[in-house]
Image (tube, rainbow, N blue to C red):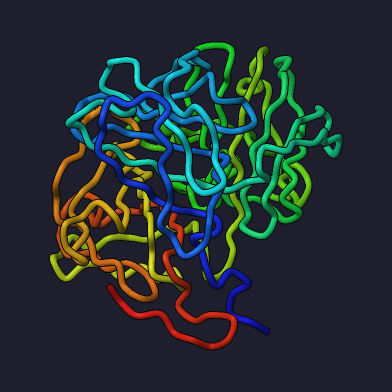
Amino acid sequence: MAYTNIDDPSAHFQTLLWTGNDVDGRALTNDGNSDLQPDLVWLKNRNAGYPHFLQDSSRGTSVYLSSSTTTGDTTWTNLVESFDTNGFTVGDDGSQVPNHIGNTFVGWQWKANGGTTSSNTAGGTTTTVQANQDAGFSIVTWTGNGTTTTLGHGLGVRPDVIIQKARGTTSNWNVYHKNATNGQQPYNVITNLNLNDATGIASNTWGTVDTDITSSVFYLKYWINYNTTNLAYCFAEKQGYSKFGSYVGNGSADGTFVYTGFKPAWVMTKEIAAAGAWVMYDNKRSTTANPQDKYFSANTSDAEATFTQYDFVSNGFKFRTGGSENGSAEHIYMAFAENPFVTSTGVPACAR
């Protein structure tokens, strides 16, 4: 059996950096081994304290959500103007996003299904889905009605992470993570992407038993099935490409090693038992191969900050500090690959 079915992760996830030049309609091209037409683009101004902007091809180019706010869909036609065959086009309206001259930017991109959606009736509520089953990612939209329900996600396997947001009203970003336990079952736990709070206990939010989340549907309690349009990003772990797990730090400069089975391209971590930011690193923004030292907090609008955190190695990430992300407490993480540790043909990856 092959170690991974995804020898080139850049076909499904890439990070793109650019410096603004005040040109409206600027086409930005990815530099990965494979072409990538993204369906989710997560943008951030690296220099200034502007929100995170998330746009996807299911909702279209004219609206965005921000992980650092509770605001619903907001219209802005000058962010991502198109999802292209190998990158995306950004606009410019004289503000500091997303192409203002003198500012630097980052765009994290995931591939779903090229913007082609289908109706999914697997659950109690009909959803609109575009899914990339190979890479374990789907974009799900639906109209909620304030009742407990199940929703089809289109992955064909059980999702490990669900990031859900009301589009038509103010709400928190609600996160299900299979390892966000904090002494509870994960279906009783809510973690909010827009907050640095510890995980909250809300019984049966994601099910009454663990098996309520299945290969075809996820469960949603009435209090987060908002009576408006809604969105969920669903992720399922794929060996050699993505990993969604937990670790306990050791508070030491000779820090915890977290095995992923690949050389990471992007990692986001969150302490769950106490307050802590959603801290994001990638393999493009640091000025040296290791350690990784440039980060954002997904839950704030802060500009990029510098803090030596960890090394990206051939099969995971290794902390190089006793800082809070390596504190002696439980943390959850999401990680996506630059290279699998071993390809389907047995070729090993090299450390950075």
Residue visible at 18% across and 60% down in the picture: 251
Q: Is residue 243 above or below residue 170?
A: below
**Seen from this angle, which residue lies furthest right?**
121
Residue 285 vs residue 144, the one in the foreground: 285
Query: Residue 70, how many percent across, how many down?
Result: 43, 18
Query: Residue 318, how many percent across, how many down?
Result: 27, 68
Q: Is residue 334 above or below residue 219?
A: below
Residue visible at 59% across and 75% down in the picture: 4
178 sits to left or right of 320: right
Residue 301 vs residue 21, the one in the foreground: 21
Residue visible at 67% across and 27% down in the picture: 221
245 sits to left or right of 326: right
What quarter of the picture does the N terminus occupy?
bottom right
What quarter of the picture does the C terminus occupy?
bottom left
Query: Residue 342, how many percent across, how many down?
Result: 49, 81
Q: Quadrant of residue 78?
A: top left
